[in-house]
Each structure stands twice: as structure tokens, then as C-alpha cells.
Image (spheres, rainbow, N blue to C red):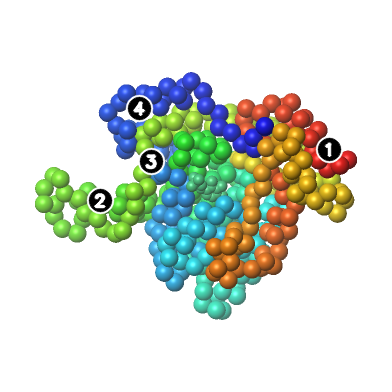
Amino acid sequence: MLPYGKQSLDEADIEAVVEVLRSDFLTQGPAIPRFEGAVANWCGVGHGIAMANGTATLHCAAKAMGLGHGDWLWTSPITFVASANAGRYCGAKVDFVDVDPGTVNMSVGALAVKLEEAEKEGRLPKVVVPVHFAGQSCDMPGIHALAQRYGFRILEDAAHALGGSYLGERIGNCRWSDAVSHSFHPVKIITSGEGGMITTNDEELAWRIGTLRTHGITREPGRMTREADGPWYYQQLELGYNYRMTDLQAALGASQMNKLEGFAARRRDLADLYDRELSGLPLRALARDPAGVSGWHLYMIRLNLDSIRRNRREVFESLRAQGIGVNVHYIPVHLQPDFEKLGFRVGMFPEAERYYEEAITLPLFPAMTDGDVGRVRGALVEALGL
Ligand SMILES: *Cc1c(COP(=O)(O)O)cnc(C)c1O
């Protein structure tokens, strides 16, 4: 089975992890700042804060932005549940903004309309989480302009997008946002096993997120409410978590960063090859915004269901039966039972729902060969009943 995604590990990665096993620190040792520095440098940003996973980074960043009971977090309905759950962990309410039918990123037009209504009703969001779907940046100047006008903070979910760029700058640099969340789950662009990172230029936000990562505890004299009892002393200043990354993970992540450029280039080449190989079939890729270069975490197709005699499920099952490990990203979050309990219903975000009906994710990972792309094309021709 050709999987839809797969990590690429080499001997250098394995050596990096083994070296940590032979060292004094298994967690919170020197590999953590090394990995944080590597990602922050790549992105061109002041701070990197490594954590246990991407979900933890979204949670802590939202909390550090002041999100709490009674507040709203808005995100895209076409994302992994984590983008929305971050708000719920903070006790906040969550709402969604429908997607652009071309890029399937959060629609700036829909956001503007929703903000106008929310202002009248006194329920403006405190935090908006644009998700760079499949690795392609959202329209960040548009979202940024609305943030200026309505006073919300922007937390980019770049779990798909490390290695991509937008308006000539690397995704993750916070040019248009307060903070950016990254994930290093094995299917993502680089991996640390499990892991995530926040990148930000906001010193105060960085400090608070770093503190939330480890129980809300600080040892910094300038931050404590009274003088230390002695050298052992620390203070818990607010309720935080154990969201630390281990040195084993950070060493793997830092080693993977040496290969990010190559991974991203190979993903781009494969995506271009898919575009060429699939042209003429009754399907379409996501629209490409010429303002940026995608990180290409995923390659999705949308079936032209009107012009084929099969439905999405039949096409999907045929591809799987032919050894193509396709997937679907994502079931709209608002249609998850745990979100329906909050009042969300079918029909609320029609572009997201339309996308979901037609979508299939094809295999894409750096070790794939050009021949694999040809094999996917052949399987698609069969699956579509052409
Ligand atoms: C992977 C992912 C995350 C975070 O995932 P973790 O598994 O917690 O690292 C968040 N948002 C999106 C869109 C993702 O794909």
C-alpha cells in the first residue's frame, strides 16, 4: 500500500537520537534550544517554543492570548479538530468561518461578513485561527486588516505549511500574526515523533507560553511575586501543564531541519507532477494562490461528481483496493458529534460541506517516486470508471 504520508528518516536522524540516549539529559536538555533555534532561524522569527505536540501549542498560545470563559475562538471548519479544540480547552466558545471554494482556506469575505454581524451582537472573537490548508497560506493581509479593525489576535495553524512561503517570506515568521503553531507528527513536513512549536516575535507571549508548557512555573526573580526562599525556589504563577518535549524528540527534530529544504522541494515537484499527470481527468486540484508557495503537506483532489458515474466512496474504495492509501482531509469539524452537541448543524458552512463531499487526499511524501505518481494516475483512471 502506498501510504498518503510517511516520514523520511536517515542514519543522521537515528544517530542524533542515540546520542541523546548516551547523554545526561533525556528531557529539557541542550537539544530543546537547538531545535527551537533551528526552526526560529528558518522562519526568521525571534522565538521558538517546543512542546509535546501541535495541539498543546495551539492550546497554550490561545490561553496566553487571554482566551478564556465567555470568549470566542474562530477557525476553519475544514481542519483537524485540534484547531477548534484549542479554544474549548481554554473554556472559550468556538465558531467557524466558511472556506473559499477555490483554496479551501478560511474565506476573508465570509470572515468580514461574520465579524460585522458579531460586532452588532457583541460576540466578536478574541482569537482567530487561520489554517494554512494543505500547506498553502491563507490570505493573511486580508485577515490582518480585519484584526486591526475588530481587535482580535491571529494564531496561524501552520501544521501543514512549514517550508512554504507567502509574499516572498517564510511561513512561520509572524509577519501577519501574533504567533504560528507548527506540528511535527510523522505525517507532517518534518517530524520529531510527536511534537509541536510556537514561533512568535512577541516577547511577552513567548514567555507566557513557555511558562504554561511547564505548569505555569517560573524561577526568574523578576517574575516572582516575592523574594526566593533559597536557590531551590520556584513559583507557580498560573495553572499550566506538562506539555514539554523530550530531548530525544528535539534531537530528531533538529536533525530533520537540516533536510527541510530538500523535503519541501521534493513535495513541490511531486505536486507539480500530479497537476500535469491528472490534467484531463474529471477532477480538480485546490486553487493555487500565486502569492505564495505551499508547504505541500497534502495533495487533495475534488471529484467532478456531475461528470462521472461513481460516487466519492466508490472511487475511494477502488483506490484503496488498488493499493493506493488515499485518505480524506477533513470531515468538517462542525459535523463531529461533539460539536453538534454545541448546536452546529449540516448546512451552516456550505462551501466546507461541498468540499467534503468531493474530496480525496492522494499520497504525497518526499520518498515517493515519479513512477508512484504515474501509478496513482492509472489507479484513478480505473477508479473513475473511465
Ligand atoms: C496535525 C495538525 C495539528 C496538530 O497536531 P498534533 O498531532 O497535535 O501535533 C493541528 N492542526 C492541524 C490542521 C493539523 O493537521
Circles 2 and 1 in contact, beta carbons < 8 Å: no
State the residue in front, 304 or 182.
304
Q: Is residue 126 left or right of residue 290?
A: left
- Please tell me whether mark 3 or mark 1 is closer to you in this view: 1
SS under mark 1: helix
Determine whether 356 is above or below 170 in the image.
below
Which amino acid type is shown beneath numbered disc 2? Thr
Disc 4 packing (10 Å; few <14; some 14–19; many ≥20): many
Q: CA distance from mark 2 to mark 1?
A: 59 Å
Rendering quarter of residue 92: bottom left
Determine whether 186 is above or below 337 in the image.
above
Rendered location of residue 345, percent (x, y): 64, 68
Rendering quarter of residue 300: top right
Disc 2 packing (10 Å; few <14; some 14–19; many ≥20): many
Residue 381: mark in rendering: 1
Would you name the residue on which mark 2 appears? 218
Would you name the residue on which mark 4 appears? 20
